[in-house]
């Protein structure tokens, strides 16, 4: 197992259990305890964990942006459900944009399996571009910008300028957190600026969100909830959320919804 892969799996373990123990990780990955300690040292230097005696805990940091490979492995079944519901909102000859979230990569995989006469997709996600490069009937536009290897996305002023030059029917985005008061939030300002450009270039904005991101707030606001036209999630939201969406005239899709 590659070093980077092992460290990503350690982060995933922390996401699920909030803490890890050196001796347990040593057995799980079949490496020495000293190797695991070095892994935790590196993750601590990157600001992802707080080391303690015999292990580490996840650092609760609003500004923390997890690597793409970690986010992709979190709640994969839920992301598949969201993607299957989201593709129903895409029609032949649509112009759509996809952000660089792990959830839209699941959507890209579903799109690739469909038969569209023509579909134009604009994205700043390298993973989406790779997935859709072989999709039947798909015309792909990849933004410019600087590659961020952790998120496999193109970012910066050139990426924003590129996205802003287009106009699409529908934008599909995800986020780190959704809160009644603070709206849609993300881990850092650069990601926020990119998502805002995607939103501003779209007639309709569709939010794809795991159910565990409700009532969570990250570092920086993307936009108010009222800016979206539809929300798609993997589980029925609580009643107070459904009431709020109804009041704001936001359509909600989830498994079993009428």
Image (cartoon, rainbow, N blue to C red):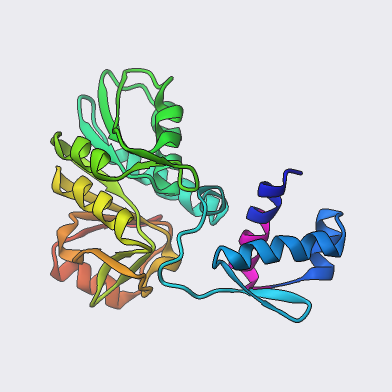
Could one spot residue 258 in this view of the protein?
Answer: no
Name the outermost residue toward the front: 45
Q: How many labels does the image show?
A: 0
Please say whether residue 130 is visible from this viewpoint. Answer: yes
Residue at the (30%, 60%) spot, across then down: 189
235 up-or-down from 85: above or below: below
Verify whether residue 18 appears in magenta: yes
Q: Where is residue 151 in the image (x, y as percent from the top left)?
A: 46, 47
Q: In which quarter of the image is the C terminus?
A: bottom left
Is residue 189 found left or right of 49 in the rendered image? Answer: left
Foreground: 179 or 67?
Answer: 67
Left or right of residue 147, residue 97 in this image: left
In the image, residue 101 lies at what x, y percent?
A: 40, 48
Estimate the x, y position of residue 113 in percent, counting from the top left: 44, 27
Residue range of the region highlighted in magenta in the rendering: 9-19
Residue 112 falls inside the magenta stretch:
no
* Above or below 42: residue 54: below
Q: Nearer the viewer, residue 223 or 110?
A: 223
Q: Quadrant of residue 143?
A: top left
Relative to 49, is 154 above or below? above
Magenta stretch, main secondary structure class: helix
Classify residue 185 by image quadrant.
Answer: bottom left
Q: Residue at x 25, y 38 (%)?
A: 158
Q: In the image, is 251 to the left or to the right of 239?
A: left
Residue in view at x 41 percent, y 22 percent: 133
Q: Which residue is found at the position 52% from the left and 52% from the top?
A: 67
Q: Residue furthest bottom?
A: 53
């Amino acid at each position: 197992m590659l070093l980077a892969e092992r460290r990503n799996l350690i982060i995933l373990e922390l996401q699920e259990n909030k803490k890890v123990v050196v001796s347990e990780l040593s057995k799980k990955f079949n490496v020495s305890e000293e190797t695991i300690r070095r892994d935790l040292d590196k993750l601590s230097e990157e600001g992802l964990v707080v080391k303690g005696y015999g292990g580490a805990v996840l650092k609760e940091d609003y500004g923390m942006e997890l690597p793409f490979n970690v986010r992709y492995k979190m709640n994969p079944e839920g992301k598949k459900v969201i993607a299957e519901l989201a593709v129903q909102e895409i029609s032949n000859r649509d112009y759509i944009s996809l952000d660089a979230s792990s959830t839209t990569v699941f959507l890209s995989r579903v799109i690739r399996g469909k038969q569209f006469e023509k579909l134009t997709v604009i994205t700043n996600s390298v993973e989406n571009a790779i997935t859709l490069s072989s999709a039947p009937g798909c015309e792909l536009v990849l933004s410019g910008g600087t590659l961020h290897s952790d998120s496999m996305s193109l970012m910066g002023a050139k990426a924003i300028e590129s996205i802003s030059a287009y106009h699409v029917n529908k934008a599909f985005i995800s986020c780190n957190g959704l809160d009644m008061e603070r709206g849609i939030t993300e881990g850092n300002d650069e990601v926020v600026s990119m998502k805002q450009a995607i939103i501003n270039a779209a007639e309709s904005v569709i939010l794809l969100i795991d159910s565990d991101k409700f009532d969570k707030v990250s570092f920086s606001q993307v936009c108010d909830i009222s800016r979206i036209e539809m929300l798609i999630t993997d589980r029925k939201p609580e009643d107070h959320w459904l009431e709020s969406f109804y009041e704001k005239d936001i359509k909600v899709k989830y498994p079993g919804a009428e």
